[in-house]
Image: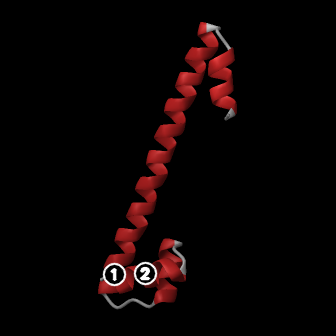
Amino acid sequence: MELNEWIKKYVADDETQEELNKWDIEIATNKGIEQGKAEEKIEIAKKLLAKNITIEEIMGLTELSEKEIMQLKEDK
């Protein structure tokens, strides 16, 4: 059982429960932002591949790994 689940199960304090709910929302929001950033890097890499930019340059510009970029190239 995760700590957050344990606290929700065993802490009946409404104030604590409210804070936990806010924390859950903040975590979900941050995950969404990170996912959006990752998707943006992939889209940029695809555009750079289409312009025949080298893998090394794409790695430097997007911070994607060589493996990730090669996968995008193969999926093209």
Name the residue beneath numbered marker 1.
75
Label at residue 71: 2
Q: Identity of the amino acid at label 1?
A: Asp
**In the image, is residue 62 above or below residue 56?**
above
Quarter of image, res 65:
bottom right
Q: Quadrant of the C terminus?
A: bottom left
Residue nearer the viewer, 34 or 11: 11
| Residue displayed at 64% across by 9% down | 12
Residue nearer the viewer, 70 or 36: 70
In this rendering, would 25 be left or right of 44? right
Using a 10 Å C-alpha cutoff, classify the residue at mark 1 as few (fewer than 14 neighbours), some (14 to 19) or many (20 or more).
few
Q: Pinpoint residue 44: horizontal percent, then vertical percent.
A: 37, 72
| Residue displayed at 37% across by 86% down | 74
**In the image, is residue 76 above or below residue 18?**
below
| Residue displayed at 45% across by 85% down | 70
Whether tag 1 and tag 2 are in contact, CB under 8 A, the answer is yes
Q: Secondary structure at mark 2?
A: helix
Q: Identity of the amino acid at label 2?
A: Gln
**In the image, is residue 2 above or below residue 17?**
below
Q: Pinpoint residue 54: horizontal percent, then vertical percent.
A: 44, 91
In this rendering, would 22 be left or right of 7? left
